[in-house]
Amino acid sequence: METPQNLPRPSELRSVALDDNGQLVAWIKHIDPHRERWEGPTYAYESRDNGATWGVLGPVPKGTTTPAGRVFSKIEKEDRGWRVVDMEGGGFEVQHLEVDHSWKTAHKFPLQMCRQ
């Protein structure tokens, strides 16, 4: 059985919300890059200090779609003169739309390989 103590492991941020008590709640799904169809568990985490530290609340029950409270909207890849572009070979860059209507790279984020 998968447990939060097995972390760090590849994971996907599924949702972030501000619960009724004003605490941040994040849902993190465990993934396995070597098994594409693997349905790993999703765990709920809570922060009582605005995201500086996180504690495990426990596994999210199957069939639950979003955390309770005000759910943050997903950040789009392009918005009001900014966009995120995937780089060839991995990584991405953040670009800004200039006055002359050309896209200029503001910062590159190269692919970071995990240590074995």
Image (tube, helix red, strand yellow):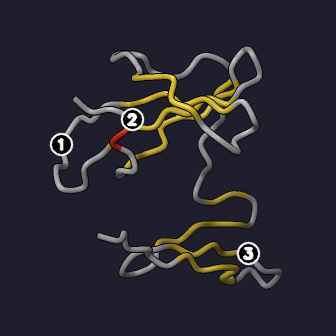
Q: Which residue is mark 1?
A: 37
Disc 1 residue type (three-letter): Arg
C-alpha gap between disc 3 and disc 2? 41 Å
Mark closer to the observer (1, 2) = 2
Check the image and report above or below for 15 versus 86: above
Q: Position of residue 33 (x, y in %)?
A: 25, 55
Q: SS class of the residue under badge 2?
A: helix
Q: Dot 1: few (<14), some (14–19), or many (≥20) neighbours within 10 Å?
A: few
For image coordinates 51% across by 73% down, the residue present is: 92
| Mark nearer the N terminus (1 vs 2) | 2
Say if mark 1 contacts mark 2, CB within 8 Å.
Answer: no
For image coordinates 37% across by 69% down, the residue present is: 114
Q: Which residue is mark 3?
A: 97
For residue 19, side relative to residue 32 (left or right): right
Q: SS class of the residue under badge 3?
A: strand
Q: Position of residue 49 (x, y in %)?
A: 75, 36
Disc 3 residue type (three-letter): Leu
Say if mark 3 contacts mark 2, CB within 8 Å.
Answer: no
Disc 2 residue type (three-letter): Pro
Image quadrant where one finds the N terminus = top left
Q: Dot 3: few (<14), some (14–19), or many (≥20) neighbours within 10 Å?
A: some
For residue 116, side relative to residue 91 (left or right): left
Q: Which residue is mark 2?
A: 4
| Mark nearer the N terminus (3 vs 2) | 2
For residue 64, side relative to residue 108 (left or right): left
Q: Quadrant of residue 65?
A: top left
Say if mark 3 contacts mark 1, CB within 8 Å.
Answer: no
| Mark nearer the N terminus (3 vs 1) | 1
For image coordinates 59% across by 80% down, the residue present is: 108
Q: Position of residue 8 (x, y in %)?
A: 40, 50
Mark closer to the observer (3, 2) = 2
C-alpha gap between disc 1 and disc 2? 21 Å
